[in-house]
Image (spheres, rainbow, N blue to C red):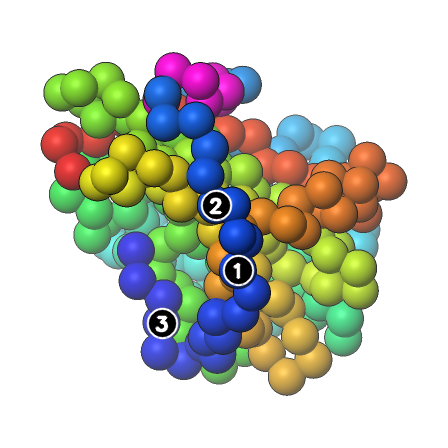
Amino acid sequence: MNFALLLTLAIVGCDPSGKVPTDPSSIQTAASTDTATVDSTQIAGMAMRHPVEWHLSNSDPAALIFDTGDTLPMHAKDLRLVSQVTSPLGKPWFIFSGIDSEDSDGLRALFVVSPGDSLTRGIQHSWHMPGRLVDSTSVATYYEASVFAGEVLRDTIGVVWYDRSLMPDGQWRLNTTLLQFGRTGPDTIILFGQSRKSATIALAVKGKCRPLTPIDQRTASH
């Protein structure tokens, strides 16, 4: 899952410890084995805050058609709305989950789009789903992510991934990936470590952002 070149990429910070237990069984099991979806009450609330409406075309590949007249081709199947976020300027951003058409394992992934934004096309690649990736042969977890959407850091609106990846030496590498919906467009920032995760959780407790429900997915040997 490569980041698009249209995004601003900054690599800053470093967690001096950067290690967690190497036993994959110590990783917390995802709370759900089904895709995170927004219930009808939440969708109704979103519609009141964000009047932009959308529907899926029956074309192949599928396309999101917004009532603004904007049409965005989506290289994914079984798209489902999981969250919606408003930028500082009031622009709606939609977060969908879907099966990535370009992924050989057929994994479900996240797609983040907004109608009428020329930069949207630059981030139409897939993003990791929250939850775990498990090797189907060894049944070992090699990736895990927690994902939040909303005001994920103080005065920062967007989507944040707190993830950890199993390295060949058996150590876990911790990273933070922030997709920030700024005033001039979306920016991607990668931070080493997860020193800001407690701040995001505190904002989630206050209702400023929400965690996306994780799922476990099995893959071929990686």
**Tag 3 or tag 1, which sits nearer the N-term?**
3
Residue ID at (36%, 22%): 24
Q: Which residue is mark 2?
A: 18
In the rendered structure, the answer to whether residue 105 lies left or right of residue 56 reads left
In the rendered structure, the answer to whether residue 146 lies left or right of residue 150 reads left
Label 3's element? loop
Q: Position of residue 63 (x, y in %)?
A: 37, 58
Highlighted magenta segment, given as a residue range: 24-30
Q: In this rendering, which labeled residue sits more in front, label 1 or label 3?
A: 1
Q: Contact, CB < 8 Å: mark 1 with mark 2? A: yes
Q: Contact, CB < 8 Å: mark 3 with mark 2? A: no
Q: Which residue is mark 1?
A: 14
The amino acid type, in three-letter code, at marker 2 is Gly
Q: Which residue is mark 3?
A: 4
Label 1's element? loop
Label 1 to label 3: alpha-carbon separation: 23 Å
The amino acid type, in three-letter code, at marker 3 is Ala
Q: Quadrant of the C terminus?
A: top left
